[in-house]
Image: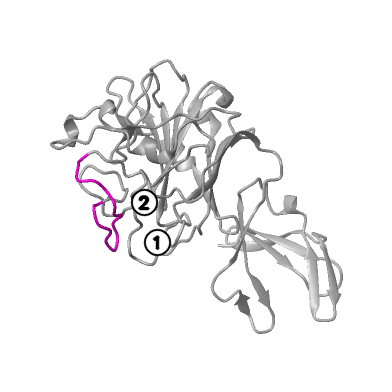
C-alpha cells in the first residue's frame, strides 16, 4: 500500500499527503514544482520529503489521472531503485571472469527456459558498508528475473556469502551450508553466513560448540534484498550491529552462486542438484559421486592464482554416506580479502 500521495492540480506547486490512521492527511502544501509543456508535465519532488533513502532502496509508485481513475502502469507499480549515492565505503570489489558459470568446467544449465543464458554468471562482487549496514552486491552478466514470483524479486539464483572475522586463526566452521558440498581452507572458518534467495533468506551463525549452522532470527528478519534489474544486480543489506564488534575491513569473505531449489534433495538446504545429464530443473555435467559441489559460479578474481575450474574440481571423489565426510572431503573455497581487486 502507498504511504505517500503527491497531488498536482495544475499550476506550479504540489501537495503532499501521508497516511494516518487509514486516511490521507496533508503534510505539505508546497512539496515540489511542476512545469507543463505541450504534451508534457514534469514534476520535481525532494526525496527527503518522501523518506530517508540510501543506495539500493526501492521506491514503488503509480500514477492516477482524473477523471478516468485508472492507475498507470497497468501491470503494477513502477519500481525505482536508488543508485549508489556515494555513501557506501566499498572495501572489496572482485571482477569475476565472464563465462565461467559452469562449476568445475563441466556443468550445464537445466533445460527449462527460465534458466536463461548467464543468469548464474557473476560479473562483479562488492563488499561495502555504511553507518548502519554491511552491503553485499552481486552483479550478473545475465538478467535477474523473477519467473516464479518470489517476494524478494529473484527466483533462480541462490547467493551465499561467508564471513570469517578472524581469518587464519582456525575459528568458526569450515563446511559451507548443507548441500553446497564445499568447505573453507584449513585455518579458516566462518562465523556468519548470509544466504540470499527469493523465499527463505537467512543470516546464519555458527554454534560455538558443535560448529553447526543456526538461524540468526533477528538478523534474518532485518536483512533486505533489493534487485536492481537495470544493472542485473542483487544488493543485500544486513545491519552491522548483528555482526558484533570488529572492523569489516579486517574480515575475510567467500562468495558463491548456486541454483535455488524449492524441492531439494534430502539434507540439502534449498539448492539445485547437479546430475550427470541435464534435465528440466536439474543441472547436468556432474560426476557420479556423492561429494561434488553444487556451486555454479565461484567469486574469484579473473587474475587470481588459480582458475575456478581447477578449484572446484580439486577434491577426492567418494561414494558412501555424505554424513560421514568432513571438510577435507570437499572442494576448498579460497577467501577474499578487503582491498582485493
Q: Nearer the viewer, residue 319 or 136?
A: 319
Q: Residue at x 21, y 30 (%)?
A: 325
Q: Nearer the viewer, residue 146 or 256?
A: 256
The residue carrying mark 1 is 115
Q: What is the CA distance from the residue labelled 1 to the residue labelled 2?
A: 10 Å
Main secondary structure type of the part rendered in magenta: loop
Q: How dense is the environment of label 1, judged by Cα within 10 Å: few (below 14), some, or many (20 and up)?
A: many
In the image, 108: left or right of 34?
left
Q: Residue 229, image x and y in percent?
A: 56, 58
Within the magenta stretch, is there residue 36?
Answer: no
Residue 259 disc label: 2
* Residue 265 sits above or below residue 338 on the image: below
Q: Nearer the viewer, residue 50 or 89?
A: 89
Q: Which residue is drawn at 82% across and 75% down?
A: 10
Say how many tags the image has. Answer: 2
In the image, 116: left or right of 127?
left
Q: Residue 97, image x and y in percent?
A: 51, 45
Q: Residue 94, image x and y in percent?
A: 56, 38
**Range shown magenta:** 275-290
**Label 2 SS:** strand
* Residue 19 sits above or below residue 309 on the image: below
Amino acid at each position: 500500500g502507498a504511504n505517500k500521495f503527491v497531488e498536482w492540480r495544475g499550476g506550479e506547486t504540489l501537495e503532499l499527503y501521508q497516511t494516518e490512521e487509514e486516511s490521507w492527511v496533508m503534510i505539505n502544501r508546497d512539496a515540489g514544482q511542476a512545469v507543463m509543456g505541450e504534451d508534457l508535465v514534469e514534476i520535481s519532488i525532494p526525496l527527503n520529503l518522501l523518506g530517508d533513502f540510501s543506495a539500493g532502496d526501492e521506491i514503488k509508485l503509480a500514477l492516477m489521472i482524473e477523471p478516468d481513475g485508472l492507475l498507470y502502469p497497468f501491470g503494477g507499480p513502477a519500481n525505482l531503485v536508488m543508485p549508489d549515492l556515494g555513501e557506501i565505503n566499498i572495501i572489496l570489489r572482485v571482477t569475476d571472469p565472464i563465462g565461467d558459470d559452469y562449476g568445475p568446467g563441466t556443468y550445464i544449465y537445466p533445460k527449462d527456459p527460465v534458466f536463461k543464458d548467464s543468469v548464474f554468471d557473476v560479473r562483479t562482487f562488492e563488499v561495502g558498508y555504511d553507518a548502519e549496514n554491511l552491503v553485499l552486491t552481486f552483479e550478473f552478466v545475465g538478467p535477474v528475473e523473477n519467473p516464479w514470483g518470489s517476494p524478494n524479486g529473484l527466483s533462480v539464483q541462490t547467493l551465499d556469502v561467508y564471513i570469517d572475522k578472524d581469518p587464519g586463526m582456525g575459528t568458526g566452521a569450515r563446511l559451507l551450508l548443507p548441500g553446497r558440498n564445499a568447505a573453507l581452507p584449513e585455518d579458516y572458518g566462518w562465523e556468519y553466513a548470509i544466504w540470499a534467495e527469493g523465499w527463505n533468506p537467512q543470516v546464519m551463525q555458527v554454534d560455538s560448540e558443535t560448529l553447526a549452522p543456526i538461524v540468526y532470527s533477528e538478523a534474518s528478519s532485518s536483512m533486505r534484498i533489493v534487485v536492481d534489474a537495470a544493472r542485473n544486480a542483487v544488493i543485500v543489506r544486513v545491519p552491522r550491529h548483528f555482526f558484533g564488534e570488529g572492523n569489516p575491513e579486517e574480515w575475510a569473505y567467500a562468495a558463491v552462486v548456486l541454483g535455488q531449489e524449492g524441492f531439494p534433495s534430502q539434507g540439502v538446504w534449498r539448492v539445485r542438484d547437479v546430475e550427470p545429464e541435464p534435465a528440466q530443473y536439474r543441472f547436468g555435467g556432474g560426476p557420479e559421486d556423492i561429494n561434488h559441489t553444487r556451486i555454479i559460479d565461484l567469486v574469484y578474481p579473473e587474475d587470481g592464482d588459480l582458475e575456478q575450474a581447477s578449484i572446484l574440481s580439486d577434491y577426492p571423489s567418494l561414494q558412501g554416506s555424505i554424513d560421514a565426510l568432513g571438510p577435507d572431503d570437499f572442494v576448498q573455497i579460497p577467501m577474499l580479502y578487503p582491498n582485493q581487486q
